[in-house]
Image (spheres, rainbow, N blue to C red):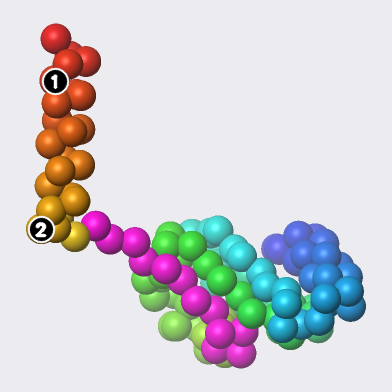
Amino acid sequence: MWNQELEKLSEVVSDAVKKYGANSVGVYVISFDEITPILIQSPLYEFLGKVRWYGSDSIAQNHHITKNIDSALFAMKTDLSNPLYAIDSESEKSRDLQEVLKKNYMKSVQ
């Protein structure tokens, strides 16, 4: 299903690894549920497993990755890391931002 895209990605990663070395190359993937089949198929391409993978917050808590052994193994092999952004609503900066947004919103609706 993802063969054409992964083939292209593999070529780009291969060229970058040859030029810069595997430790200087990474894959950043922005995805939703399609991440699982991508991770399942990625081991078919040699260079994709030689670099570190990073993901977006949209896949940070995707339980499908860990429920499939092949996607989980590839994620572990590539040390797939995903940030999960959250705002501390109790912080002073957060409260200040909320006040500014409320004021600006009220001005725009009047």
Q: Residue at x 77, y 65 (%)?
A: 9
User: Residue 83: within the magenta?
Assistant: yes
Query: What's the distance in space between the residues labelled 2 and 1, CA to CA?
Result: 22 Å
Q: Would residue 104 appear left or right of 4 to someone viewing this image? A: left
In the depicted view, which residue is nearer to us: 101 or 29? 101
Q: Would residue 20 appear left or right of 50 to someone viewing this image? A: right
Q: Are marks 2 and 1 in contact (CB under 8 Å)?
A: no
Quarter-wise, where is residue 74 in the image? bottom right
Residue position for label 1:
106
Residue 7, visible in the rendered structure: no
Query: Magenta segment, principal secondary structure?
Result: loop
- Quadrant assignment for the C terminus: top left
Determine which of the numbered discs, if any, sits on residue 95 in the image. none
Spot occupied by residue 23 in the image (x, y as percentages of width and height): 72, 83
In the depicted view, which residue is nearer to us: 97 or 1? 97
Q: Residue at x 48, y 62 (%)?
A: 56
Give the residue furthest to the top. 110
Relative vertical location of residue 30 with respect to residue 22 in this rendering, above or below: above
Q: Amino acid at mark 2?
A: Glu
Q: Secondary structure at mark 1?
A: helix
Spot occupied by residue 76 in the image (x, y as percentages of width and height): 55, 88
Q: Amino acid at mark 1?
A: Met
Other residues around mark 2 within 10 Å, as few (<14) / some (14–19) / many (≥20): few
Q: Residue at x 50, y 76 (%)?
A: 81
Other residues around mark 1 within 10 Å, as few (<14) / some (14–19) / many (≥20): few
The mark that comes first in sequence, 2 or 1, is: 2
Relative vertical location of residue 5 with respect to residue 46 in this rendering, above or below: above
Relative vertical location of residue 94 with respect to residue 39 in this rendering, above or below: above
- For the record, the magenta segment spans 76-87
User: Residue 15: within the magenta?
Assistant: no
Residue position for label 2:
90
